[in-house]
Image (cartoon, rainbow, N blue to C red):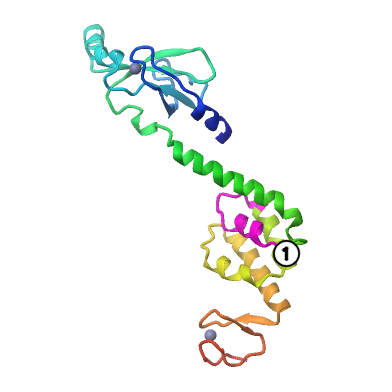
Amino acid sequence: MLSTLLKYIEEKHYCPHCSGDLSLCHAPPVHVGDGLGWGSEYLFICLNDTCPLFVKGWDYIANQYGHVGSYRYMEIPNSKESYSMMVVGKEAFTGSIIDIEDVKRQNVRYQQQQDALAALDTCVEQKDLTPVMTLLLDDSVSTDDRKRAVALLVPLNDLACIEPLRSHAFKDAHLEQEINLAIGQLLANHFMKECPFCTELIKARATVCKHCQRELAA
Ligand SMILES: [Zn+2]
Ligand SMILES: [Zn+2]
């Protein structure tokens, strides 16, 4: 969850062994030790390679268990639980560090989507195409919300929507079909059509395209 992640990103956790910052990571799918889940999607882990726990762990595990491994200090978010977690190499967990900048970008995008959704109710009245386009051109928006936006294309009656919609590669074929229908309706309402050769908008009655000069079938 984005909101959970945003909260954890703001938290500071320190390793009691080296005083270094703990890194926020995705939890592995199962508890390495006993096969149970962690009860959290995220873990705070000390990934400092000079942390005494990690440095001394290699000898300890070799002596105690006779195999290669060491320990990383770890805390479970929203709990007082901490563990010395066995790892088999330096790289364990380094691939699961949360990309904080990416989470912040996702949040900005999420806020823009929420603002656009809130603006749908008044956008026709205000002749504002922007919220509709924000939702239609963002493939991370839910299908239901994008369908609400499609339904406003004809009432908005703004031909400026056509070019960006035609240029966007829609992953949802059904949504694209609905958009094409709306564009067709919009063009008909304006007595316009798209030139099949150069895609410029021209009068529906035109027999020659005024942009590319090609003859159009009647
Ligand atoms: Zn440490
Ligand atoms: Zn043309």
Is residue 143 found inside the magenta-colored segment of the image?
Answer: yes
State the residue at coordinates (42%, 28%): 25
The residue carrying mark 1 has its beta carbon less than 8 Å from ligand 2: no
Q: Is residue 200 left or right of residue 115?
A: left
Is residue 96 found inside the magenta-colored segment of the image?
Answer: no
**Residue 71 image position (x, y, % from top left):** 32, 16
State the residue at coordinates (50%, 40%): 104
**Residue 45 image position (x, y, % from top left):** 40, 22
Q: What segment carries the magenta color?
A: 127-145
Give the number of marks. 1
**Residue 80 image position (x, y, % from top left):** 51, 12
Q: Residues within 10 Å of mark 1 (few under 14, many from 20)?
A: few
The vertical placement of 6 against 67, above or below, is below
- The residue closer to the viewer here, 174 or 201, is 201
Query: For mark 1, what is the residue?
Result: 127
Look at label 1 and name its amino acid. Lys
The vertical placement of 6 against 172, above or below, is above
State the residue at coordinates (54%, 60%): 170
Q: Is residue 217 left or right of residue 88?
A: right
Q: Which quadrant holds the C terminus? A: bottom right
Per the image, label 1 sits on a secondary structure element best described as loop
The vertical placement of 157 against 48, above or below, is below
- Specify the quadrant of the image occupied by residue 70: top left
Which residue in the rendered view is the most extreme toward the right?
125
Q: Is residue 131 left or right of residue 6?
A: right
